[in-house]
């Protein structure tokens, strides 16, 4: 079984080179895993927005609500217009949208993130497989070196 063009077989590398490849894969895995966590958090945030939109109904007009200013600071308010909401579209910009449009926007974002998460998961699994293969090849190479040293020591006797 030959390696695809542009790739190098682990068998052709020295123990030190395999260690370097393994270290690089470990760093890439950390980065991809962190990115996966960030995307998962963003997806959860958008799903929470969709759930919040479900509670904004015409029946709730003029009802008292607590408006979050931070994660633990709220101010009292009233729902003045249950048909329209302000949507954060990024970088500090807000757009007024109908509640249904806002929900569709957040749903589209959740679906896009779901697709990105699936792609990222595949990349993580591939890197993890390569990382494991490097570890296995390092063990094989170390065993070969020990056998060679033992055979060399036996000749001297």
Image: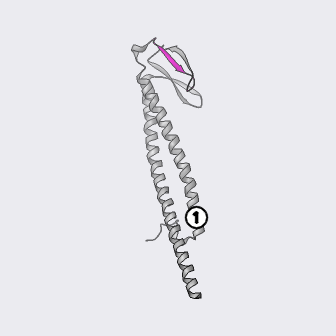
Q: How many marks?
A: 1
Residue 134 higher or lower than 28, as above or below: below
Residue at image x 42%, y 27%?
Answer: 51
Residue at image x 54%, y 45%?
Answer: 34
> Which of the pair 87/20 is nearer the observer?
20
Magenta span contains residue 63: yes
What residue occupies the far top of the structure in this picture? 62
Residue at image x 51%, y 63%?
Answer: 135
What residue occupies the far front of the structure in this picture? 157
The colour scheme of the drawn protein is one colour
Q: Magenta stretch?
A: 62-71
Rendered location of residue 62, percent (x, y): 46, 11
Q: Is residue 9 visible?
A: no
**Quadrant position of the N terminus in the picture:** bottom left
Q: Is residue 24 left or right of residue 3?
A: right
> Which of the pair 81/117 is nearer the observer?
117
Magenta span contains residue 91: no
Residue 56 higher or lower than 117, as above or below: above
Rendered location of residue 53, percent (x, y): 43, 24
Residue at image x 42%, y 21%?
Answer: 55
Rendered location of residue 110, percent (x, y): 44, 36
Residue 140 higher or lower than 30, as above or below: below
> Which of the pair 105/148 is nearer the observer?
148
Res 150 quadrant in image: bottom right
SS at circle 1: helix
Q: Is residue 142 left or right of residue 104?
A: right
Rendered location of residue 132, percent (x, y): 48, 60
Label 1 CA crowd tier, 10 Å (few <14, some 14–19, many 20+): some
Which residue is tagged 1? 19
Q: Is residue 106 visible?
A: yes
**Quadrant position of the C terminus in the picture:** bottom right
Res 112 quadrant in image: top left
């Amino acid at each position: 079984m030959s390696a695809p063009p542009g790739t190098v077989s682990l068998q052709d590398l020295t123990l030190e080179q395999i260690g370097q490849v393994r270290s690089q894969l470990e760093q890439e895995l950390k980065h991809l895993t962190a990115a996966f966590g960030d995307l998962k958090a963003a997806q959860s945030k958008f799903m929470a927005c969709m759930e919040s939109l479900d509670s904004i109904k015409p029946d709730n007009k003029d009802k008292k609500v607590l408006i979050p200013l931070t994660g633990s600071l709220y101010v009292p308010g009233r729902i003045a217009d249950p048909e329209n909401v302000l949507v954060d579209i990024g970088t500090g910009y807000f757009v007024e949208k109908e509640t249904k449009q806002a929900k569709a926007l957040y749903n589209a974002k959740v679906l896009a993130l779901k697709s990105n998460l699936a792609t990222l998961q595949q990349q993580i699994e591939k890197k993890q497989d390569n990382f494991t293969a490097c570890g296995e090849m390092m063990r094989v190479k170390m065993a070969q070196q020990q056998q060679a040293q033992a055979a060399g020591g036996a000749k001297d006797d």
